[in-house]
Image (cartoon, rainbow, N blue to C red):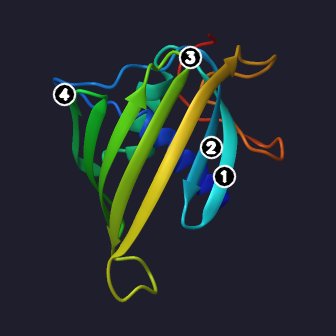
């Protein structure tokens, strides 16, 4: 379950729709991400290359999102999403700030309906703080998510070597 939370957090950073407004792409390199929510804190690293963030969105949603809107605000970006995977519907809103060169911070709330074993909607809040820590390491490729135990989750189609 922790790995899914990390992937979800990474996808929040890569939420770039094909619309008039888009989030800037993160600078290529190794990014350390800390996700904090009601279930605790999770950390991971991700190798980011040109196009990684855009590719992650496509790979994560697989066409399951009927709405992904990004609006520029005075201090960053507001992101609104509506996605359905199987019987679960997720409606979310996030505020994204940072320079996308060294830091990105996302604060989001998602309302989940149709969760197995839950009689009603479940609300989840998540804060994701990411910072660039240098270049990707030897053998790492864009899209690779490195878990704290060293396990690597490779995301297919997320770009070429940075």
Q: Earlier in the sequence, mark 1 or mark 2?
A: 2
Q: Earlier in the sequence, mark 4 or mark 1?
A: 4
| Residue for badge 1 | 42
Q: Earlier in the sequence, mark 4 or mark 3?
A: 4
Instruction: Give the CA separation, mark 4 to mark 3.
Output: 22 Å
| Residue for badge 3 | 49
Q: Nearer the viewer, mark 3 or mark 2?
A: 2
Looking at this view, is 9 or 125 the one in front?
Answer: 125
Q: Is residue 128 left or right of residue 106?
A: right
Q: Which mark is residue 19?
A: 4
| Residue for badge 2 | 34
Badge 1 density bin: few <14, some 14–19, many ≥20, Cα 10 Å: some
Which residue is outermost to the front? Answer: 74
Instruction: Give the CA separation, mark 4 to mark 2.
Output: 28 Å
Secondary structure of the residue carrying tag 3 is loop
Q: Is residue 47 left or right of residue 149?
A: left
Residue drawn at point x = 28 percent, y = 41 percent: 79
Check if mark 1's residue and mark 2's residue have beta carbons within 8 Å: yes
């Amino acid at each position: 379950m922790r790995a899914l939370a990390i992937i979800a957090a990474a996808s929040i950073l890569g939420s770039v729709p094909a619309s008039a407004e888009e989030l800037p792409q993160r600078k290529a390199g190794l990014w350390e991400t800390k996700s904090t929510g009601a279930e605790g804190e999770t950390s991971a690293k991700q190798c980011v290359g040109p196009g990684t963030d855009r590719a992650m969105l496509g790979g994560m949603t697989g066409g399951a999102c009927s709405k992904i809107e990004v609006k520029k605000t005075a201090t960053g970006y507001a992101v609104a999403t509506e996605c359905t995977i199987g019987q679960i519907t997720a409606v979310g809103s996030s505020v994204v700030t940072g320079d996308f060169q060294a830091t990105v911070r996302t604060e989001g709330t998602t309302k989940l309906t149709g969760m197995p074993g839950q009689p009603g909607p479940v609300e989840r809040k998540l804060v994701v703080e990411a910072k660039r820590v240098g270049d990707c390491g030897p053998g790492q490729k864009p899209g690779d998510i490195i878990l704290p135990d060293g396990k690597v989750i490779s995301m297919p189609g997320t770009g070429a070597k940075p």
